[in-house]
Amino acid sequence: MRSMVLTVEELATAIHHKSGIPMEDAERNALFVMNLFGYDNRIIDNVLESEDRGLFYMLEEEHILTTEREEVTLYDGREWRTHYWVLNKDMITKLALGFKSRREDAGEQNVYEGLPPEAWVAGPSAQ
């Protein structure tokens, strides 16, 4: 059974694959997210700055993050809601492993094998 420890590389690969943003940006976003989560699976929404929530909403749309909330009744009868962001580790792992295996499968194919013999003949610029 695979450990549920998530790496920055796995998260970056999942973000890149799911959202289509360049890998460099996906790595930067993954590092930011992992720095916030640390070793935990969820964080309280209050730790985010308003401009950072855009990234979290995008990751939620891609099913990389989910949300939870807890409601507690205060001593005076009022309800207190706490909102959390949760890493969807199953989806992240699925995306990261699926993308990695597709890249490995593509790498095993020799792209030159399918070329016809005339492709190896020097063209007019080589004469």
Image (tube, rainbow, N blue to C red):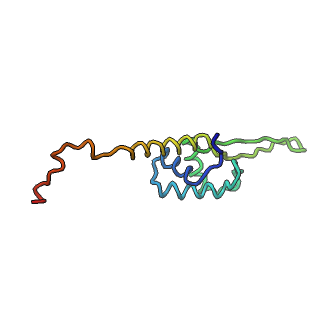
Q: Residue at x 60, y 52 (%)?
A: 7
Q: Residue at x 87, y 41 (%)?
A: 77
Q: Tell whether 123 sits left or right of 99.
A: left
Quadrant in which the N terminus appears:
top right
Quadrant in which the C terminus appears:
bottom left
Residue 88 seen in this snapshot: no
Return the x and y of residue 63 as percentages of the image width and height: 57, 41
Q: Quadrant of residue 3?
A: top right
Along the viewing direction, whichever of 87 and 5 lies nearer the viewer: 5
Along the viewing direction, whichever of 46 and 63 lies nearer the viewer: 63
Return the x and y of residue 35 as percentages of the image width and height: 64, 58
Return the x and y of residue 5 as percentages of the image width and height: 65, 49
Return the x and y of residue 115 as percentages of the image width and height: 23, 44
> How many numbered discs sit on the rendered protein?
0
List the single residue furthest toward the right: 75
Q: Tell whether 93 sits left or right of 126.
A: right
Q: Residue at x 10, y 56 (%)?
A: 124
Residue 70 seen in this snapshot: yes
Q: Tell whether 68 sits left or right of 112.
A: right
Along the viewing direction, whichever of 112 and 68 lies nearer the viewer: 112
Q: Quadrant of residue 76?
A: top right
Is 50 located above or below residue 73 in the figure? below
